[in-house]
Amino acid sequence: MKQIVTSTILALALVSELSELIHAQENSIPNSTNRPPQTIQQDSAVTAPTPLEREAPRVYRREIVSFGQDVTLRRNEVCSDMVVIGGNATVAGTVEGNLVVIFGSADISGKVERDMVVVLGAAHIASGGTVEDDAVVVGGKIDLGSGGTINGARREFVLGNKLLNVKWIGDWFHNGFLLARPFPPSVHWVWIVVSMLLVFYFLLAALFPRPLQACVVALETTPAGSFFAGALALVLIGPLMFLLAISVAGILVIPILLFSILAALVFGKVAIYRSTGEQLARQFNLAGLQQPAVALLIGFVLFYLLYTVPLLGFLVWGVATVWGLGAVLVAAFTRFRREQEPPLVTTTSAALTGISSATFQEPPPTIPVSADLVTLRRAGFWIRFGATLLDLVLLGTLTAFVGPLFLFFWAAYHVAMWTWKGTTIGGIVVGIKIIRVDGQPINFAVALVRSLSSFFSAVVLFLGFFWAGWDKDKQAWHDKIAGTIVVKLPKGLSLILL
């Protein structure tokens, strides 16, 4: 009995101790109702999630590539890389890789874990926005907010501020290129460019009336041939450039060829506009509108109205470019073929003496003396360009491994051949010869002066070589310096014998 009473007392004491311990723990926890209201609001603002965060789970996306559209990466979104061309990028989430924007702007309030590159646009990094590596903007500026962070290098390449702070390029890209038209009328600066082109075209028409007339004739006489010639030329330009680039001769030929192509494209456009204006004037029987200047203006206005139409604008522009280039090539080939044709032989005296034209035979060509060479037809630019091209291919193939010494071999080859035969191997093929203005053959001194002077003709964008195309004596700058002319020998006369 005594043991039972003792056990009961101990159990009651243990329960009493446990109750006091539990009561003490409850008193140690502060009562939320006794805390200041401001403290309760601050804790709830820090710890309580917003409804948007509770409702929008984290979304993982792969790389984002957009062309011509704006892209927005929301706060709960993550992507690997982002590339936007022709649009704006808004990043409120996380870009784990690089952010690249071309022809647009970047607005960052989230995080870019690697580089940010904006080309022809601007970037704004807002408060809370972060770029972990480098931030590079070409053609614009970086607007870094008070809370924005760039942990890498910050590089801005404004390059002219107004010229390459390219809102004007972006306007053309959105309103012109993306709509497949070269002339968007809503872009104001395009009107300035069009006005300048019109003045430039009229200037070309005034300075070079005969070459332009030859291109117009080629368009009217061989329209299909001109178009296919232009298309074939555009197809062959790429392989030809590649072959020239891998040869030593390409160092000299490629700049000349590029300039020739550019000139042909410009002349072709002028010829297309003028020919179209003349055709319209003929259709309506308006003789006054067939004047070259008026016809050029009519064709120019018509084509640029078509250039404003989406999709149709680029199509018309492409067809006009190909057709105009072909017309220039056909006109040049026709001129080249005329230069190679021998003079016509009249049979009037043979008919008067009763000799039948069937029995009349042209006498074999005689070797002209030095004085007679001056009276021969002058060789124009294109036939001389063909001879130079042949020499470049030949010498470039033989000296493919000499590197910078090619210019030395090029000069030595010409001096030696001019002194020996008055021409080169390419000149022998096309039938042209270099003589002094008094008809005498050139010697070593004249050949050396002419060779060294040719480098002067090449320095100014090869203008000295092109000068032979419109000079009355077909003389290039180095011809004028050395006192030489280039003549076309009659057909059937071998230059090896001279």
Image (cartoon, rainbow, N blue to C red):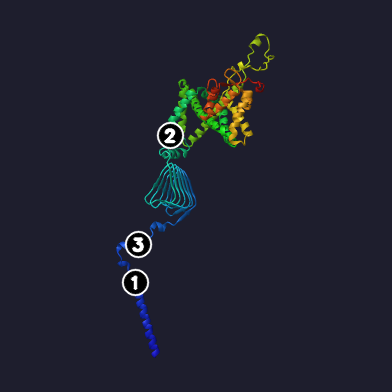
Residue 387 at least partly seen: yes
Sequence-first tag of 1 and 2: 1
Q: Dot 3 lies on which element?
A: helix
Q: Which amino acid, by three-letter code, is at mark 1?
A: Ser
| Separation of residues labelled 2 and 3 (CA atoms) | 59 Å
Amino acid type, mark 3:
Asp
Nearest to N terminus: mark 3 or mark 1: 1
N-term mark: 2 or 3: 3
Q: Residues within 10 Å of mark 2 (few under 14, many from 20)?
A: some
The residue located at (35%, 62%) in the rendering is 43
* Image coordinates for residue 63, horizontal then vertical, percent: 49, 50
Per the image, the residue denoted by label 3 is: 43
Q: Are marks 3 and 1 in contact (CB under 8 Å)?
A: no
Relative image position of residue 165 (x, y in whole percent): 42, 40
Residue at disc 2, secondary structure: helix
On the image, numbered disc 2 is attached to which residue? 190
Residue holding disc 1: 28
The answer to whether residue 423 is visible is: no
Q: Quadrant of the N terminus?
A: bottom left
**Within 10 Å of the Cα at label 1, are there few (<14), some (14-19), or many (20+) other Cα atoms?**
few
